[in-house]
Image: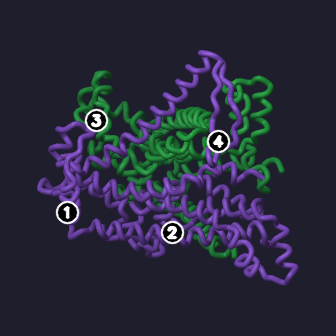
Amino acid sequence: MFAPYLILLALFGVWPIVQAGLVSLEPTVINPAGGAQNFADVVADVRFVPAALNVVVFLVMYVPAMLIVVSLMSLLLDTVQGRWNLPLRLAYIVPASMTGATAVLIWYFMLEPSLSPYQDALHALGITQGNQIWRQGGLAWIFVAMAFFVGAGNWIVVQYGSLQSISDDILEAARIDGANSWQIAWRIKLPLIRKYLVYMGILVFAAGLQVFVEPQLISGSVYTGIATDWSLNQLSYDLAFQSNNLADSAALSLMLLVVCIVAAIVVIFRSDFFEGTGVGSKK
Amino acid sequence: MTTETITTASSGRAHGVVRTRGFGAITGRTVVWIVLAVFGILSVVPMIWLILAPSKTAKQLNGDAPFSFGSFAQYGVAWNNLLSQNNGVILNWMGNSVVYTASIVVISCLTAVLAGYALAATALPFKRALLIITLVAMIIPPVALVVPLFVEISAIGLYDNPISVILTSSFYPFGVFLAYIYFSTSIPTELYEAAKVDGAGEFTTFFRIALPLSRGLFGMLAFFSFSAAWVNYFLPYVLLQSQENFNLSLGLGFLFTSSPALNPQNGAQQSLIGRPEIALASLFLAIPILIVFIASSRLLVRGVLAGAVKS
């Protein structure tokens, strides 16, 4: 009964990691001896540090923005239980349907001063040319905006769902004790959904670390070359498919993977998210 | 002093009467509504723009107001232009998207439900270890495994074969976790035990007892599996090479990089693929997932995470 999944797990969950481990040690053009030196070669690649910095800047903006806005919006949404609740939730998940290439198209138009529905706002900010926005230094902002736009709505709806699991008795008791909406949100609701927010934070972090599609598509279409090797995953991709250096590509992938696995283990064993599921830190 | 009664939403919590105090509370309330409404408008604006875009010619799209409507006939023109691209390869892409997504949803949900049940209700060796591996796999974003999967897929000779995309995407640890939680909390374990005492085997118990009780679970699993599979980009991007094997999301990316629509320096100058055509192709990608989202919005409210891990 477990077998079909176990086969998929072994073939596409575990084996690729083992094989990548083996490939990462193979000889390369720069390092004919192979071995662990490949990992050092990747880090020493001139493209590595800039890409790593880009990803760090991206994460520093993306993860807190997601956590703060999603918490705030789901709490606000929870305070309006009337007939507008459902339409609002539906509106919030609309952007999640515009991912990948669609998101790139949308953002190209939204940020192009001559075409954008927000052209007045862009003009007010002194932006009259697309290339004032689409330039090397400002790319992280754009990619954060794109990733945020696709991801936030779904998470707002999910965390709104988490808020629904809080028992009425607790909220009623707080209200009787004279707590206002602000105090209830801050002192009661937020702490009660904290573990779901932590879980979300880890998932958002792990996904952000792997940012690929947005810079890759922008760079391949709208502004050629503007974001080549902008993220670590793009570098890994280019090592494999442009430089034919599968060993270094696998090495870089493994490094990113290790960070994700560590994050996963932290959330499983150090947070109370999986409490009660038989594996968490507390039972 | 103002008193306002908040009616209970069908799926929401039962609320009593909320008393708000004086002027400050009213302005607070207004601010909340403004924030909620503005966020809602910002969320919907790009979709409205995208729906209107193919109604205009490329010239109108650049010159007219962003929210103007061209004509219905223009949707047809844009569609015909899309069809002209490589003998209607877009039809291949759409067909592929449907076939890949349907296969992935079926395989991933079935394996996940079986595995979740096995973890929750049967005597499985190394249960804890398997559960932990599943949790780790569920937290790692699928993108992280793309290059390792490419290495493996090319080694076993499935490169550029759609089977590779279907099988690798059917690995669904999050689904296993949801099914495991469902079978261990929503259905009393006494039920399985009673069936076994009555002489039912593992499979009989699963098909006669557990499966009929898990329609809601299937809905949720299919929802998440669908939303990931339909827009799948990076994995097919790496595993597939031939244009006719692309899914729609990959095909759209290809139109982006190969046509002069967004960058005049790209591709053939005579291409019929302009911005309205790209917008129309984007709509084909976005609308199905939007419909599924809206149709299953009630499922999501129940609290995906809370419902899943609350024990």
Q: What's the chain of the residue with tag 2?
A: B
- Image colouring: by chain
Q: Cβ–Cβ below 8 Å for labels 2 and 4? A: no
Question: Alpha-carbon distance for marks 1 and 4?
Answer: 49 Å
Q: Secondary structure at mark 1?
A: helix
Question: Alpha-carbon distance for marks 3 and 1?
Answer: 26 Å
Q: Cβ–Cβ below 8 Å for labels 4 and 3? A: no
Question: Alpha-carbon distance for marks 3 and 2?
Answer: 37 Å
Question: Alpha-carbon distance for marks 4 and 3?
Answer: 39 Å
Tag shown at residue B200: none
Q: Earlier in the sequence, mark 1 or mark 4?
A: 4
Q: Colour of chain A?
A: green
Position of A200 with respect to A134 (left or right) is: right
Query: In the picture shown, does residue A14 fall above or below A46?
Result: below
Judging by the rendered image, the residue that carries numbered circle 3 is A116
Judging by the rendered image, the residue that carries numbered circle 2 is B104
Number of numbered discs visible in the structure rendering: 4
